[in-house]
Amino acid sequence: MKFGIQFFPDIGPEEKSAADYWGESLELVDLCDDLGYHHVRTVEHYFHRYGGYSTNPVVFLAAASQRTRKARLITGAILPVFNHPLKVAGEIGMLDAISGGRLEVGFARAFLPHEFRTFGRSLDESRDRFDEGVEQVRRLLEEENVSSDGRFHQFSNVTSLPRPTQAPRPPFWIAATSADQSFAMAGTGGHGLMTFPRDPEGLRARLKIYRDAWRAAGHPGNGQVMIAFHMFCAPTTAEAHSVAGHRIDAYLKAQYDAASDWAEGTTSKDYPTHPQLTETLGKMSFANKLGDGSMWVGTPDEIKGMINFYHDAVGGFELASLQVNFHTMKVKTAEESMRLFAQEIMPEFA
């Protein structure tokens, strides 16, 4: 298993400025090469303390690419529904060049109604915009003189520049949470799968959908699965829980607040399960999620047990993307956790 770090801000100016948040995040990126972390990843969200500091993952990853020479740079993830494919393809080519061919591109559908509302997009167009956008970006990266008469974006005889440094293009990842169709799409397309911890039985079933689709499409192997976890490692259980517990609760509250439209009556054919998922999210807390392996908080030995439990329970995964500086955590505290995790835990899963 490989371990990387991800940055998902869940704060606003009253808690920490964007300059301080991203400056501290780059300090943590500085540790990646020496400690052996596989990747650096960040999100795309807007207008809310839940992710709103990270409006363009390419911008941060360009800076991160100059602070590490080994780690992969992963968008986690670009939202085609809010972006023009010509612009996305050009930015991907540019960052792939700047990073020396270390970019990997994750795409997601977006799921927050307030973002769709503010951008003037329909929730009911989400999947169609996603499918069209990913395919148009793929063609722009792999081909020259591309024409596309899409429902949402049209262009003729375009050769995107810069051309990708990696041939034929950077690897793609597809983010999926609950829709079987998204898991199957990732497998059929031969893309990596990004997902989040959920009940192990449910996730195991969806990872099977992904891997079955992967093999049915004739791709070699079983694909790649990346799961995101909150992680805080400390010498004692009491310290780990004291530092991380209330900050994870604050993150969960920010997530629920951002998604609360689903709990207040918003519906969409493209998101049939989100009202129920949001209701479940509102009941989550550090205390009631710690025991299911979906949050890695504790001593090195405790976290080793959590990793083994969750890995076995969901049928295995290849990469863990660790959220290491959530909410108001001090950068020195996050650094100490990263160092302890790298020294005591990572060697056992190499």
Image (tube, rainbow, N blue to C red):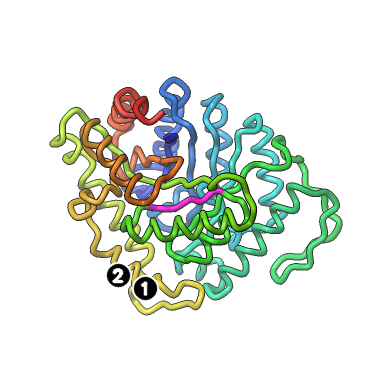
Region in magenta: 192-196
User: In percent of the image, x 58 and y 61: which residue is there?
Assistant: 185
Residue 296 point in image, percent of width and height = 28, 41
**Three-letter amino acid code at disc 1?**
Pro
Mark 2 residue element? helix
The CA span between labels 1 and 2 is: 6 Å
The answer to whether mark 1 and mark 2 are in CB contact below 8 A is yes
User: In percent of the image, x 52 and y 30: which residue is there?
Assistant: 71
| Circle 2 residue | 279
The dot on residue 209 is none
Q: Is residue 202 left or right of residue 102?
A: left
User: In percent of the image, x 75 and y 51: which residue is there?
Assistant: 140
Q: Badge 1: how crowded within 10 Å, few (<14), some, or many (20+)? A: many
Vertically, is 280 above or below 222? below
Vertically, is 122 above or below 57? below
**Three-letter amino acid code at disc 2?**
Glu
Any magenta on residue 114?
A: no
